[in-house]
Amino acid sequence: MADGSWDGEAPPAAPRGRSRWGGWLAGCGIAAVVGLSVLAVGGLALANRRMADPEVKTKLGRAFLPLVQDLVEDLKTDEGTRALYTQQPGLHARYPTEEAFLAQVRPWRPSLATMPAGPEATGALETRVSLQGMGLEVRLGDGRRLRLRVQGQGRRRLPLKDLEVR
């Protein structure tokens, strides 16, 4: 028979949701991710704005131009192109074999021969910074453009990720 008193067993407790501290920590984590994203995008925007400054472009052009000119000299011969391909592992993703790279570069050689030299070469070099790295673009004398995507940095050689003439 059922006991009619109120002194019986208490019903089981309702399952608890997230504690107050758990919600607070989740909110702080989301705020941190949003804050870091805003800082990263703002830093890239500032870098791009700074790159638009003619004085900065001139300084970067002077710094990168000798490296780009050396690279173009390498591309003018089969031996130099082969050496460049072996020294640049970043190119292996787009060009799986040395012969494929050579076949791609050979038609570019007449355009590469028109690369500006001297002071006007600095004005022909453009730089871009993005999440994928830095890009360099050189306006060649025949109207085409040599485009380089760079990964990381190097003092003697540009560590290339991609290379094309359009």
Image (cartoon, rainbow, N blue to C red):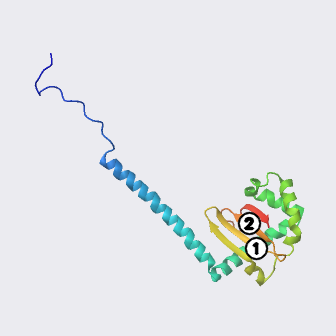
Q: Secondary structure at mark 2?
A: strand
The numbered disc on residue 21 is none
Judge whether 131 appears above or below 50 on screen.
Answer: above
Residue depicted at 63% across the width and 79% down the height: 56
The residue lying toward the viewer, choosing from 160 and 26, is 26
Identity, as a three-letter code, of the amino acid under mark 1:
Val
User: Quadrant location of residue 99?
Assistant: bottom right
Q: Earlier in the sequence, mark 2 or mark 1?
A: 1
Q: Is residue 141 left or right of residue 44?
A: right
Q: Secondary structure at mark 1?
A: strand
Q: Residue at label 1?
A: 138
In the rendered image, is residue 158 in sight?
no
Judge whether 15 appears above or below 151 on screen.
Answer: above
Image position, residue 58 (x, y; %)? 68, 81
Residue depicted at 39% across the width and 51% down the height: 26
Image position, residue 90 (x, y; %)? 73, 57
In the rendered image, is residue 47 in sight?
yes
Q: Residue at label 2?
A: 148
Image position, residue 20 (x, y; %)? 30, 48
Identity, as a three-letter code, of the amino acid under mark 2:
Leu
